[in-house]
Image (cartoon, rainbow, N blue to C red):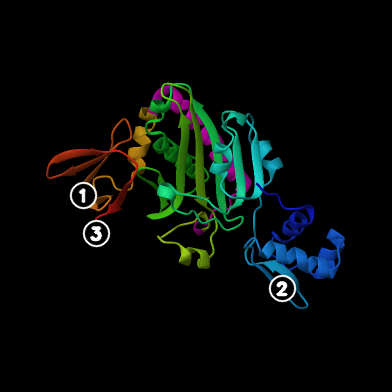
Amino acid sequence: MKQLNSRQQALLNMLADGNFHSGEQIGTVLGISRAAISQQIKSLRQLGIEVFSITGKGYRLNTPLQLLNPDILRQHLSGAPVHTCAVIDSTNHYMMAQLDRWQKGECVLAEMQTAGRGRRGRQWHSPFGSQFIMSMYWRLDDGPGAAMGLSLAIGVAVVRALEAQGYHGLSLKWPNDIYMSRRKLAGILVEMSAAVGGLCHLVIGIGINLNLSDEVIAQLDQPCAHLAEQPIMVDRNRLSAAVIQELRNALALFERQGLSAFLTEWNRLDMFMQQPVKVLLGEQVIQGIYCGIDTEGNMLLQDKDGVRKFVGGEISLRADH
């Protein structure tokens, strides 16, 4: 976990508005020389932050940034601590490496991940300040069996939070992706550590695209969406707090009632309901009509042999067209 140094943070705070700031202005505010400014600009560029410089005008970011602000997060959240950092390899990895340290609902948020992972080990691209990147710790006293269908409940919780902020066109794809306008908006990665019949430790990773550049989108291996496509002005820190609070509420409800408490909303949001799909299971391709999920979160598929049940894991679900 890495924080920006005080000068990097002060410089980025100045540039975050997306306007030009002269070298003289930056030097006065930060109390550093022109040469030192160049070094600080270079250090930001090394994080992948696009900083433009034009003689006579100064420096500005390619796009404005809303930076994580611990004070604002604390204003909107109570209970377990919420930690923020600038750069981390993986928020999930960081939390999984020290499971005994965390309270239920404790979170780590990052501006950027260098080794973020999605489902089945895929890389999760995370340009600086362009996404909601968070991991939350939770535990289930009834063991790993009690986590059946958890990622589906988490998907419902994230959509609830986004819809409450005014976003629309959202849907869920089994087992753990959130789509907007039928393009991937967010992913969920739940990792656990548990002994049979014992306490189940969970780390819940969520990544939501907030504002991606055209260049980043072009590099991705599937059609992706980001919240900036919709004309809604939402403060990033308030949005983060809303997602965290909704997730904490959903996890507490899941503990009491399991997936059954989320089935109605999942069915409303299910992107492939009653549509022809193909299931990729290794080299095998199975085609049929997608029939939603059962009470344990298994996928149901109707083919020539009747309704079949599929458990998550190494399965991919795709539209059949």
Helix, strand or loop for disc 2: strand
The image's mark for residue 321 is 3
Image quadrant in which the C terminus is located = bottom left
How many marks are shown on the rendered structure?
A: 3
Q: Position of residue 253 (x, y in %)?
A: 46, 26
Q: Residue at the spot x=58%, y=43% of the render?
A: 240
In magenta segment, residue 307: no
Q: Earlier in the sequence, mark 1 or mark 2?
A: 2
The image's mark for residue 53 is 2
User: What segment carries the magenta color?
Assistant: 229-258
In magenta segment, residue 247: yes
The answer to whether any part of residue 181 appears in the image is no
Q: Position of residue 115 (x, y in %)?
A: 54, 52
Please state which amino acid type lies under the numbered disc 1.
Ile
Give neighbour class at mark 1: few <14, some 14-19, many 20+ (Cα, 10 Å): few
Q: Quadrant of residue 260?
A: top left
Give neighbour class at mark 2: few <14, some 14-19, many 20+ (Cα, 10 Å): some
* Direction from residue 44 to residue 56 in the image, left or right: right
The answer to whether any part of residue 70 appears in the image is yes
Magenta stretch mostly in which secondary structure? helix
Please state which amino acid type lies under the numbered disc 2.
Ser
Helix, strand or loop for disc 1: strand
User: What residue is disc 1 on?
Assistant: 286
As displayed, is residue 85 above or below residue 100? below
* Direction from residue 9 to residue 67 in the image, left or right: left
Q: Are marks 3 and 2 in contact (CB under 8 Å)?
A: no
Q: Position of residue 273 (x, y in %)?
A: 28, 45
Q: Are marks 1 and 3 in contact (CB under 8 Å)?
A: no
Q: Residue at the spot x=81%, y=64% of the render?
A: 26
As displayed, is residue 259 above or below residue 280? above
As displayed, is residue 17 above or below residue 203? below
